[in-house]
Amino acid sequence: MAIDMRQFHQTFFEESLEGLAGMETELLRLEKAAADNGHDAVAADPEILNTIFRAAHSVKGGSSTFGFDEVAAFAHVLESRLDDLRDGRSRPDRRVISLLLLSVDCLRSLIIAARTGKDVDKDAVDGVRAQLESLESENAVPAAAPVMPAKSSGTAHWDVVFRPHRRLFHNGNDPLRILRELSDLGELKVQADLAALPTWEQMDPEACYLGWNIELIGPVTRETIADVFSWVMDDCTLEVTAHPVQSLAPRSITEAVASMDAHADTLRVSVPKVDALINTVGELVITQTMLSQLTTNFSFDNLSRLFAGIAQLERNTRELQESVMHIRMLPLSFAFNRLPRLVHDMSQKLEKKVELTIHGEQTEIDKTVIDRLIDPLLHLVRNSLDHGIEPPAARLAAGKPETGRIELKAYQKGGNVVIEVRDDGRGLAYDRIFSKAVERGLFPASANPAPEEIAEMIFRPGFSTAEAVSDVSGRGVGMDVVRSNIRSLGGTIEVASQPGSGTCFTVRLPLTLAILDGLSVQVGAHTYILPLVSIIESVRINPEQISRPAGSAELYGLRKEYLPLLRLYELFHVEPRSTDLAQGLLVIVEADGKKAGLYVDDLLGQQQVVIKSLATHYRKVEGISAATILGDGTVAMILDVTGLTRLAHASTGRGPVPAGDTFTPAVTPTLN
Amino acid sequence: MATILTVDDTASMRQMISFTLNSVGHEVIQACDGKEALQLLQGKKVDLVIADVNMPNMDGITLVKSLREQADYKFTPILMLTTESQESKRQQGKVAGATGWIVKPFNPEQLLNVVKKVLG
């Protein structure tokens, strides 16, 4: 029987890492419970420890089954300590929990090492293991030695007297099976003992009355025979007597050294999602059958049925698309799960008291987004902890509760997932940020910008260095990286802050990176796609509202705002239907709080498009984020609104300026 | 061939067990804990149950007890997956009505041997 065990490794790695993440969460809960309930924490909620224990146990079972001995050995020690906790032989104090958390880290690195075939920091792992072992109480179970199946050579002659108890059947055992198994071991002579058989009237059909006297001649040991009876040992009387002439030669165990597969990128999908997919495919097949039947003998009488069929096909396709997209969706808990540990470790290091609450971790988002969201998210929470939340004394002095709060909230809103990271710390130090901005020439000293504009500054590259706003706020260390990471996911980040009472970062992300809701627009003979999320409105152009300040590109006055106007045909060097602005339309778009007007010939309609990377198929192009293939097979470019608005604002000669009611252009345009 | 229910909260174990048993032609049903197992078995008969001991929602021992209370499963072989160190669990399992056990770690060959032993 050759079954390649490697095919199960990937699942083992994934579920083990997941189990460890869960274990971490529960350990943190246990620590909190211990702080709340003292030493009765374990008794107060036994399920916490049971969950932790199960995770360790599963890792141990799996790793030993699949031959990851180092993982198994470590998990075994860990499991023993958890057993001590469960049985009350040790207490879940801070020291123990910290050590258990460290053990989770070790197990994780061991598993990752097994997965990637790389080495682990053996000293660190051994160190933690030694600490774990030194925690061991006297009555702990020693590490179990692997059982080696022994096979004997040489023939022996055994007499076996087997008298099952009446209840033997009640455990699902059957003497016949045992006799059959014995017969596999050698030559067998069996005699039934009917002595205990009662009369028909007295007989209980569910009881076992028979006994057997067995003679077995074969190359077997007493242990092998006992093994056959091991399940029924307590349910029978068994005598094995022998004339032993035997020699033992333990079979050497060949260790299965599995070479590791390269880490394949896989996705675990819940069964209901697959069911939904299969269901939709089924319907698609039905529609297809219907359509092909319709077209084999087509007559124009059937035209309405054909249209109905095509409408159905459209619906099926959309449903199929949704089902497939859903397969890529994972709950945000995959990203959020890391945070409790981070907060735990950091708050200890910083000597702050912080409570982290998480809401909406079941909100689902594309796997790619999750993978790339983790770093920015960690950064935001770290920032809140480090710079937002004050030390306990300062909080008390400010009349706040000693324990700070960091709240993470995720929810779906339209085609976006919104994640809020909120703290009740000291908030942004607007005055410090403003003076720093003035120092760097980003504002004139006389300016009186709105708080939001000042807050914007923390996302500037290199704006806020450690010494800039260090102990007062310090926010902004690497915030530009956070923003660019989130932008690369097609998302946005905003900050709102109330000095003294806290800060809230709001991250908006698209549900998926593969499909985009777009508006197709026409410029000359070409079709371009604008992401729907970035479109505010489309207006017919009134030539009187166009102004051309000196040294600047065209501006369009729209309800007291002046927006830079970008002629797409100029930018992409295509022949427009008309260069007369009055003949076309202006699509007002917004990115990063900046608006711009894009001049197009016409709007074609709204549609979902599948995003094809331009960089992989061609190369990166300014102003274009990706491409797609339209229904008629032509390729259309998806416009990069962020890039375009930036370009538009740069061309106004003023650098990026927040457009809005407060904005007055340096050169007052004439509006007649 | 036989219909076998495997109950384990770890997917890799379930996969390994069902793949192994499938490879010799058995039909395998999977459940991730005792509760799900009981639901799956309602109105359905299987020839063998292989259950892990440690599981969320309903552990293996409770599952064995509940199954033995049902007329359909009074004599059905039920095997528990245990580790060397779980001697006491094994005893509890026996008392609850388990037929026998498979000691983890085990390889596909060992699994097939045990299954052959109970199914014949």
Image (spheres, rainbow, N blue to C red):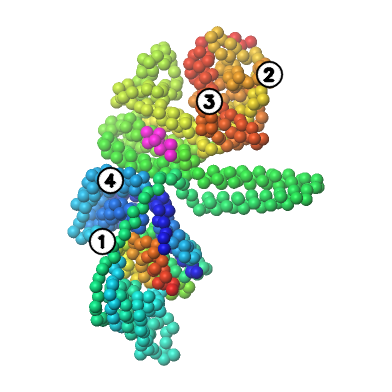
Chain of the residue that carries numbered disc 2 in the rendered image: A
Residue ID for mark 1: A145
Callout 4 environment at 10 Å: few (<14), some (14 to 19), or many (20+)? some
Q: Looking at numbered disc 4 in the image, what kind of residue is underneath it? A: Leu
- Same chain for marks 2 and 3? yes
Q: What amino acid does circle 3 point to? A: Val
Q: Secondary structure at mark 3?
A: loop
Q: CA distance from mark 2 to mark 4?
A: 68 Å
Considering only vertical position in the picture, is A242 above or below A623? below
Q: Nearer the viewer, mark 4 or mark 3?
A: 3
SS for tag 4? helix
Q: Residue at x 32, y 83 (%)?
A: A215
Disc 3 crowd rating (10 Å Cα; few below 14, some 14-19, many 20+) is: few
Question: Which numbered disc, 2 or 3, marks the residue closer to the eye?
Answer: 3
- Chain of the residue on which disc 3 is drawn: A
Chain at numbered mark 1: A
Residue marked by disc 4: A102
Distance between the alpha carbons at the discs numbered 4 and 3: 47 Å
- Disc 2 designates what residue? A578
Q: Of discs 2 and 1, which sits in the foreground? A: 1
Q: Earlier in the sequence, mark 2 or mark 3?
A: 2
Mark before the other along the chain sequence, 1 or 3: 1
Q: Secondary structure at mark 2?
A: loop
- The mark found on residue A621 in the picture is 3
Q: CA distance from mark 4 to mark 1?
A: 25 Å
- CA gap, disc 2 to disc 3? 25 Å
Q: Mark 2 is on which residue type?
A: Ser
Checking the image for residue A575, the label placed there is none
